[in-house]
Amino acid sequence: MQTETEIQSGGGQPVRCLLGMLGTDVHSKGIRTIAQLLRDAGIEVIYLGEHNSVKGMASAAVDEDADLVGLSFSSAAYVTYTRQLVEEMKRIGAQDIPIMLGGIIHPDDHAELREMGVRGIFGAGSTTEEIVEFVRSMGRSQ
Amino acid sequence: MGELADSILAGDRRAAGRLISQAERRDPQAVEDLGILYRHGGHARTIGITGPPGAGKSTVADALITRFRKLGQTVAIIAVDPSSPISSGAVLGDRVRMMRHCDDEGVLVRSMATRGALGGLSAATGDAITVFDAMGFDIIIIETVGVGQSETDIVGHSEAVILLQTALGGDGVQAIKAGVLEIADLIVVNKKSTSGSDKMARFLRESLHDRPMRADGWDVPVLLTEASEDIGIDKLTDTLVQRFYHNSTQDRVSVTRRRQVAAHLTALADVEVRSLTKRLVAGDATPEAWQAVLERRSDPWTLSAQLFEKLR
């Protein structure tokens, strides 16, 4: 009974994670899977789906008071798009909101992405537990 | 203290987002800021959109945003989706239907999870309305979770409740049942190109016709739309404006305001009562008392009476 009550009350503030895809990337299966997985881990996912603009994504992060922004990529243009998003977040004063990437991310690009300020990179082979643990660690209440 | 309120009154959307999050987690710090903002409000017109899952609530909201923006009005949207009863997580997926407005400064969308509230809204809905009203948004649209028959909290928070239905919403018996159908100020049969839509609209009109006149004298219209094609949205917007006009007499304004304050107070009280209930059941009931009930030496009625005795 006690544990059930604890689950119900959530033990504080659920993490709010914005999840979306930028540009022409249409491979939405992966991001839907992640959205459900995070939901089952007690995260509030603000689901933006595919075809988002950099500007729309950044303003959504602000208006929704997101604790972090998760991007999923299956196309090769992720370095360019991520850079554009980082710049836009800076422009609107939201550079403190962490960004994580998932999908097909080549290890050769990790260093460049980290340098831009990307906090989490989850390419092929990442486990569910790793992703969930990272997202939870981004909550402000922690 | 009061810093967030000052920033919000200066138009800071980041601060607005933060304060709503604080209100969602019942952070005592939020109270003072909300109190300041409340004193600046009272100007926004509020629209509620409710209906079963998949009826097109977000799509109708999106179409209405476009229309009100053309009329020069700014629009804030509070979009509520359910929290998981198991993990307390959520997928808030209403915003995705409204992304074409994401570059428009005159539109603000805030997604919220129900976090255990059962009336179709978040307990912090009234708080979010307070924030957006103080920021000067002309129109506030509140979208409920996909409802069944009983989630009627929206009625207190908005002066124009749109109930969406589709052709698949059942027959003439469904149309006379108690519940959400009774609280609608406007009924909209969306996805009108689906076969059976006209019949549905007829059922609904007939059931409305058989009801006594409403106390506010408002005649509930039944409209047909195909929101994804922007069909029927002109008429819907006109009708909403008529509804606002109808509500603008001195008497009606005070009725609406009273109802909104009552809804806000009820939501705040519910949270307190729910946490009290949890404390009573999970905390105050001793392991011995539990054991007695489990072994049928006592019973739930006796234990409940004992727990409530402490409150009196």
Image (cartoon, rainbow, N blue to C red):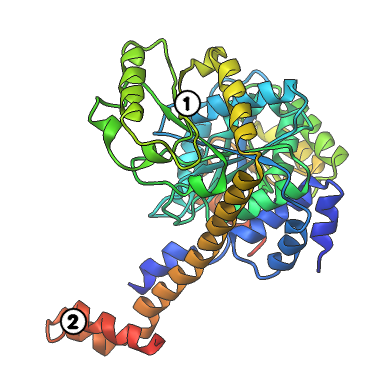
Q: Residue at x 65, y 51 (%)?
A: B128
Q: Residue at x 25, y 83 (%)?
A: B303
Subunit bearing disc 1: B
x and y, in percent, of residue B293 in the image: 18, 81
x and y, in percent, of residue B100 in the image: 67, 23
Q: Secondary structure at mark 1?
A: loop
- Mark yes or no: residue B208 visible: yes
Quadrant that contains the C terminus of chain B: bottom left
The answer to which image quadrant residue B292 occupies is bottom left
Quadrant that contains the N terminus of chain B: bottom right
Reply above or below: A67 against A18.
Answer: below
Reply above or below: B119 against B283.
Answer: above
Q: Are marks 1 and 2 on the same chain?
A: yes
Closer to us: B268 or B39: B39
Q: Which residue is mark 1?
A: B56
Q: Residue at x 39, y 54 (%)?
A: B85
- Mark yes or no: residue A15 visible: no
Reply above or below: B283 against A63.
Answer: below
Subunit bearing disc 2: B
x and y, in percent, of residue B99 in the image: 65, 27
Q: Is residue A81 left or right of residue B218?
A: right
Between label 1 and label 2, give the one nearer the viewer.
1
Q: Which residue is mark 2?
A: B293
Q: Earlier in the sequence, mark 1 or mark 2?
A: 1
- Determine the CA span between mark 1 and mark 2: 47 Å
- The amino acid pointed to by label 2 is Val
